[in-house]
Each structure stands twice: as C-alpha cells, then as structure tokens.
Image (cartoon, rainbow, N blue to C red):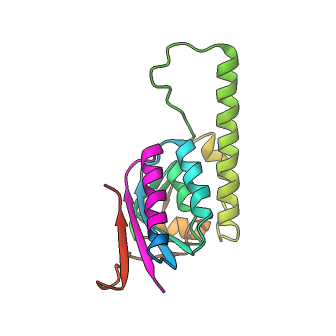
C-alpha cells in the first residue's frame, strides 16, 4: 500500500484549496493507494471550503484526515471528508456562525442583501447536513445548527470523539523514511 501524506496548515481560500487539490492529484499520479490529510486551519472562504470537501469526497482512494492543532469554521467541513478521522491530543474544533466578508463593497440594494442572506442560510444548512451525516452514530450527538446560528461551540479532542467528529484521539506519527511520500503547501 502506498501511503501519501498531504500536510496543510493555513487559511482556506481559493488558492489554498487549489493547492490541496493539486497535491492530492499529484499523490494519485505518483501511485497513492491511500491519502492522509494532516490539517490545521482557522477556516476561511466557504465557497472554497465546500468545493474542497466535495473534491476530497471524490478521491478514488481512502482518505484519512488528522487534526494537527485546530480545525475551525469551514475547515470542519473539509475535515469531515475523511473516511477515517483522527485528532492529536490537545487539538480542538470550532463551529461558529457563518459569515462573509464583503471586501471593498460600499453599497448594496435590498435584493442583493436578501440574496446574501439566502446564501448564508443555504450554506449553514449544507454545513449542518454534512456534519450530521459524518457524525451519525456518535455517542454524544449535538444539534450543530444552534452553533451555526447562535453561540460558537468548541470541541476538545475528547469531546469531538464523543460527538462522532473523530474516530480516535491519537498523536500523529510519520512513518519511517521511505515508507511514504509527503506533500505540503508552500
């Protein structure tokens, strides 16, 4: 079995999502029969995050995701793409209300504001559905919608295990040299 590990630490944006996608594609071209994504991210752009989630779900090989520190906001959705999910002791997960930045926008009409609200509501529901599907069977189910529309929810690794976010709390270990290939972002 050819294990390839993709290491990613940083915010989620269009460029970083493309980087993770390209690293996974390179791993597949190099003969990966299994991919691990070692991830720590404060989240970021929802459009890029959902696109990366659906890309990772399309991989033709097993994907293991490993929380290497913090998994926050849209990075939680990306993390949930793993068929196996692990977290280092002391790591954490953060779910909070979704938001958008508007850059240099100085004006918007009523129609545009309504459209943005509909999109935010849609993305929150999409997030909740992905979360619920991935954590089904967890010992301590959580109504994630209350945290997407209200107060944030911080999960320790142990709480994430109880909620079904992860399969185990375990320190990441890199295989001995020569047993795997590593790919990383800039």
Magenta stretch holds residue 148: no
Q: Nearer the viewer, residue 161 or 34?
A: 34
72 and 162: which one is in front?
72
Relative to 120, say whether 21 is above or below.
below
Q: Which residues are magenta?
A: 1-26
Query: Percent position (x, y) of residue 177?
Result: 29, 83
| Image quadrant in which you'd find residue 82 | bottom right
54 sits to left or right of 105: right
Q: Residue at x 44, y 66 (%)?
A: 26
Residue 96's spot in the image, x, y percent? 54, 45
User: Eyeballing the image, is 73 above or below 119?
Assistant: below
Residue 13: say if magenta. Answer: yes
Q: Nearer the viewer, residue 11 or 131?
A: 11
Check the picture and name the quadrant holding the C terminus. bottom left
Q: Residue 61: where, in percent of width, then height? A: 57, 75
Q: Using the rendered view, name the quadrant where residue 148 is placed.
A: top right
- Please tell me whether residue 72 is drawn above or below residue 123 in the rendered image: below
**Residue 3 in sight in this render:** yes
Q: Residue at x 55, y 54 (%)?
A: 52
């Amino acid at each position: 079995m050819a294990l390839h590990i993709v290491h990613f630490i940083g915010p989620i944006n269009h460029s970083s999502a493309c980087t993770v996608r390209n690293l996974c594609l390179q791993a597949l071209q190099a003969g990966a029969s299994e991919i691990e994504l070692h991830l720590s991210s404060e989240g970021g752009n929802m459009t890029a995050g959902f696109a990366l989630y659906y890309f990772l779900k399309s991989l033709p090989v097993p994907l293991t995701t490993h929380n290497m520190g913090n998994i926050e906001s849209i990075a939680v959705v990306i993390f949930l793409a793993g068929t196996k999910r692990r977290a280092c002791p002391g790591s954490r997960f953060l779910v909070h209300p979704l938001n958008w930045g508007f850059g240099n926008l100085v004006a918007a009409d009523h129609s545009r504001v309504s459209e943005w609200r509909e999109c935010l509501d849609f993305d929150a529901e999409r997030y909740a559905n992905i979360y619920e599907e991935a954590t089904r069977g967890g010992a301590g189910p959580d109504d994630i919608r209350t945290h997407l529309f209200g107060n944030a929810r911080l999960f320790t690794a142990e709480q994430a295990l109880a909620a079904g976010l992860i399969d185990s709390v375990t320190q990441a270990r890199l295989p001995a040299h020569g047993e795997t290939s590593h790919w990383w972002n800039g």
